[in-house]
Image: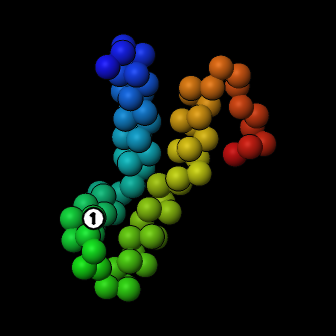
Amino acid sequence: MPFFRVLALGQTVLLARRHFRRLGREDRHRLSQLVRKGRGLSPAERHELRSILGKLEPKEFAFVTADRFSPVPLRRWMR
């Protein structure tokens, strides 16, 4: 792997870790339980999973990641 790809992957992992740490301890634990269960989730568990994933603010994560790798600073109104 070229060095810059490894560097980009490392930066993305650190950004993902930062977002993941925003969850409370209970939510992190429950998220790992639900993800391990996989396809056998009940409708209530799926709703719970969506709720926890929503707390991770995926839109903000995508923006921060794109801003990190963009040669031009992204505008604030895009958030």
Location of the C terminus by quadrant is: top right
Res. 26 in view: no
Left/right of residue 45 with respect to residue 38 in the rendered view? right
On screen, residue 69 above or below 78:
above
Using the rendered view, name the quadrant where residue 36 is placed. bottom left
Q: Nearer the viewer, residue 36 or 51?
A: 36
Residue behind mark 1 = 35
Q: What is the quadrant of the N terminus in the image?
A: top left
In the image, what residue type sits under mark 1? Val
Spot occupied by residue 31 in the image (x, y as percentages of width and height) = 31, 63
Q: Residue furthest top?
A: 3
Q: Residue at x 39, y 55 (%)?
A: 23
| Residue 68 vertical placement versus 59 (above, below) | above
Seen as rendered, the residue at the extreme front is 1
Q: Is residue 68 left or right of residue 38?
A: right
Q: Residue at x 42, y 65 (%)?
A: 52
Taking the image as drawn, is residue 52 in sight? yes
Residue at the image position 36 percent from the left and 27 percent from the top: 10
